[in-house]
Image (cartoon, grey):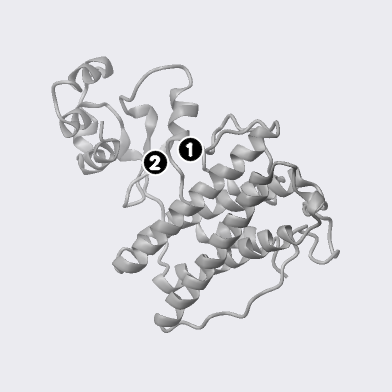
Amino acid sequence: MNILKLLADLAATTPDQFEQPAVRRDALNELGRFGAKTLAAALPLGLASVPALARDTRTILDSLLLALRLERLQNAFYTQALAAPATFFPADASIRASIVKIQAHQQQHATLLVRLISTSNGDVPALPRYDFTGSKNNTQAALFPSVFSNFDEFLRLAQLLEDTAVRAYKAMVEFLVQDNYILQTALQIHSTESRHASRIRTIRRQRGAVVKSWPSPADADITVANKTAVVYATEHATNQLLADYTSVPFRLLPIGSGPNLLTQSVPEAFDEPLAADSVDGLLNLFTL
């Protein structure tokens, strides 16, 4: 099933059609015989009563500046880790090699974004300083006090940053659609960040963490309440937003079966976008 097409068809269906009486089982049976639009019209969803959310109005330059801020922070994070004593990394040399490659990617992304901002007539901000313990240079309680001496703590923060990057780039897409080159570049970076996140998650799982290679409601919680919890806020939503910000609950769609389908399998299938102000808030935790 082309679920995105089905979602789009649902959005195009008129409110009156949602109110038509129909039996859900009958609608499911029709799936094999009718197209998605026919099925969407038959479902007694009440979807028309779901409000669309307020639309953000960021510019292309706003998105590029946020992406640069994110890439610079990640580049500094991995660079500082690679400068730690050799004993910081596990004996498996492939793990340090992965961090070396990830850092190189972040540096390339930052360099590319600086060029895009300059060619877009934007001002490239000065490089900030960071404190990845989250203590703001010991002016407050640290969030990750052993981030560069405890490898598992380093990996937890790495996962939070990579998952944030994946969600941040996904949120930027709608603001970049008017520039094909920048859009393609952002999507390529998004793909790379997804591979980073998967690799970090795999390393954590190999070290005993309860985590899948992609965000899942079944993952053990690694967030700090009221600080980094924003990374996964709304990530495990059981609905999807359409282009007009209409929320489509998956419980209303005829997709598969099983007790955990709508609460685990479906949320795992989508990386939810993360709003720019949420990304800013997370980056502020580690920026001086």
Q: In front here: 134 or 241? A: 134
Q: Is residue 104 above or below residue 10?
A: below
Q: In front here: 85 or 156? A: 85
Who's the residue at 50% across and 83% down the image?
A: 123
Who's the residue at 30% across and 24% down the image?
A: 254
- Percent coordinates x, y for residue 22 in the rendering: 22, 20
- Percent coordinates x, y for residue 117 in the rendering: 45, 77
Quadrant the C terminus occupies:
bottom right
- Percent coordinates x, y for residue 57 in the rendering: 40, 66
Give the distance between the C-alpha atoms of the residues marked 2 and 1, in whole angstroms. 7 Å
> Which residue in the protein does label 1 denote?
237
Which mark, residue 259? none
**Label 1: how many Cα within 10 Å (few below 14, some 14–19, many 20+):** many
Q: In front here: 31 or 115? A: 115
Name the amino acid type tagged 2: Gln
- Percent coordinates x, y for residue 7 in the rendering: 28, 39
Q: Is residue 246 above or below residue 218?
A: below
Which mark, residue 240? 2
Relative side of 222 to 178, left or right: right
Are the two marked residues, 2 and 1, in contact with CB atoms closer than 8 angstroms?
yes
